[in-house]
Image: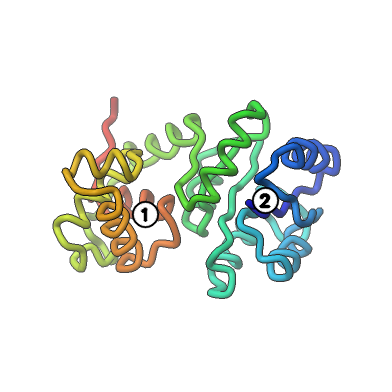
Amino acid sequence: MIRVLLVDDQPLLRSGFRALLDLEDDIEVVAEAADGKEGLALVRQHLPDIALIDIQMPVIDGIEATRRIAADPALSGVHVVILTNYGLDEYVFNALRAGAAGFLVKDIVPEDFLHGVRVAARGDALLAPSITRKLINRYVTQPVTVGAGTGLEELTNREREAVVLVAQGLSNNQIADRMMISPMTAKTHINRAMAKLHARDRAQLVVLAYESGLVAPRSS
């Protein structure tokens, strides 16, 4: 059972998301909150698998709420998925750096929304295609400093290779095929790289790969 917390200051949207999630046999909505402060309290109380958090809210916004969740070791099992109407670069960049596992835009179709919740619950990075394009474009237009303060020197060659493939959007099975190893070994390389780079999840691993220059975005 995937346990979900909804945090959004718009009651109608919360009701809509809850009605959709409640129809699923493998998903349970454990609580709702109308602002980031209340959301943080409920995260600590319920320890959900997924916290669906609006990016713009009163009292504490979604980015700050995400930052506080990611900084608390007791909440390491909580995957934050940001809900947004915008998909603006600065929101994307700041929330990913704060520790968000990914983004969903609010006008997403129900099937993709439910798929996104399940993807995030597995611990995979979740980025809507429109968000991914904006993120990549940001790095295309900005200079990077290779390896600057990232801890890349601690990675083995195979771990580096796995990180590059994660940043290219490949799944564990696809990485295993590309590296000619088992999916379990691929997962081990990725988990070790995340630990060495202090990345909370795959989404932060992608950010680090681009920030460090390990992966160079293609302007095309």
Pointers 2 and 1 in contact (C-beta within 8 Å): no
Left or right: 209, with 203 as reference point = left
Task: Give me the residue at 23% from left, 62% from top.
Answer: 152
* Horizontal and vertical percent position of residue 154: 20, 68
Q: Residue at x 54, y 70 (%)?
A: 71
Front residue of 144/134: it is 134
Q: Which residue is mark 1?
A: 205
Name the amino acid, label 2: Ile
Q: Residue at x 59, y 43 (%)?
A: 117
Is label 2 in a helix, a strand or a loop?
strand
- Indicate which disc residue 52 carries: none
Q: Nearer the viewer, residue 220 or 15?
A: 15
Q: Left or right: where does residue 19 sit relative to residue 85?
A: right
- The percent coordinates of residue 99 (x first, y second) are 51, 58
**Identity, as a three-letter code, of the amino acid under mark 1:** Leu
| Quadrant (top left/top right/bottom left/bottom right) for the C terminus | top left
Tell me how far mark 2 sits from mark 1, CA to CA.
21 Å
Residue 51 x %, y %: 65, 54
Q: Residue at x 58, y 69 (%)?
A: 75
Q: Which numbered disc, 2 or 1, marks the residue that appears first in the sequence?
A: 2
Asked whether 110 or 92 is in front, the reply is 110
In the rendered view, tell whether residue 76 sits above or below residue 5: below
Residue labelled with disc 2: 53
Q: Is residue 193 left or right of residue 48?
A: left
